[in-house]
Image (cartoon, rainbow, N blue to C red):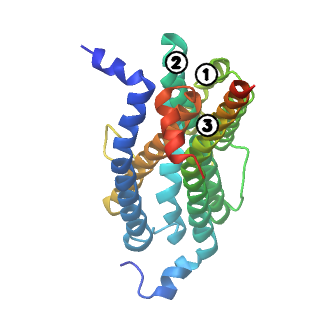
Amino acid sequence: MQFDSISEFLNMGGYAFYVWLAYGVTFFSLGTLVVSSVRQKRKVLVDIAKKIQREERLKETRSTK
Amino acid sequence: MWKWLHSYADPERAYKLSSNLLPWFATLAIAFIGIGTIWGLGFAPTDYQQGDSYRIIFIHVPAASMSMAAYMAMATCSFIGLVWQIKSADWAAASIAPIGAVITFIALITGSTWGKPMWGAWWVWDARLTSELVLLFLYLGIISLYASFEDKVLAARASGILALVGVINIPIIKYSVDWWSSLHQPSTIRITEKSTMSTDMLYPLLINIVGFGLMIAAITIVRFRSEILARNGMRPWVRELAKAEGVK
């Protein structure tokens, strides 16, 4: 370990603001990207399922007429 | 000889292959970035000139180099899609674009937070910085062009041409520090000769570069799968999947 204590590690030799801002923004944006990418699949499948249901309803009304 | 490759252009096989590959890429990406970041932040030696502010390098350089690599990957996919009309390649290109934009954004922001303590300015209109900003706009242009057509075959063609034209920007970014006098330092990692960097700093940096590459691959796979499903909503296998997983 390069740093003697946790507080020294957090202080980053006086550059704490810049270093942690850089790392914070990086991991926040990567996290947002990952979450939105993972959710995308479910949204696509839900949309397709809705479309299928709509088609089936249309088919039913047509056949009962 | 390469015919086996062609069968993976089939959406269903591409989807299954992606699903099989995803856990490997995801696990390796987390491991590499975890090790590289902890090593870089806590264990790499302090720089004798820049102090601890240089530790931004462990995310800045991977993000910047991968923003260009991702662009080349996307442009290659677009080229394959345009020339051989392989739709899976177009979908892959569309999956990479938003990831590339985020990575480029990270490269710019981390560069900015490094520039402020070292150069005294958040931003300068320097060749390297400006060409990297153009890269961000290229990504955003490609994303919006792809999103603005209802017909995705047409959308892929339009955004693919923009992606190919934009390739000209990549050598400009790469060589900007050699061609013009710049505040930005030239690269310290050399492929053909010895790197001008201590190995204690070089190893965590290389690990994070590989990690970022793996992470981009993993997120591309995630987005590529959704893109396959979205573009093949009429196929029976996708409809089965939607009936199984899409009903709330």
Q: Are marks 2 and 1 in contact (CB under 8 Å)?
A: yes
Q: Is residue B177 visible?
A: yes
Residue B83 is tagged as none
Marks 3 & 1 on one chain: no
- Nearer the observer, B247 or B106: B247
Residue A48 is tagged as 3
Q: Quadrant of residue B128?
A: top right
Q: Amino acid at mark 1?
A: Gly
Residue extending furthest front?
A64
Label 1 element class = helix
Q: CA distance from mark 2 to mark 1?
A: 8 Å
- Nearer the observer, B134 or A65: A65
Q: Residue at x 54, y 24 (%)?
A: B90
User: Which residue does the numbered mark 2 point to in the structure image?
Assistant: B81
Q: Amino acid at mark 3?
A: Ile
Marks 3 & 2 on one chain: no
Disc 2 chain ID: B
Disc 3 chain ID: A
Label 3 element class = helix
User: Which residue does the numbered mark 1 point to in the structure image?
Assistant: B160
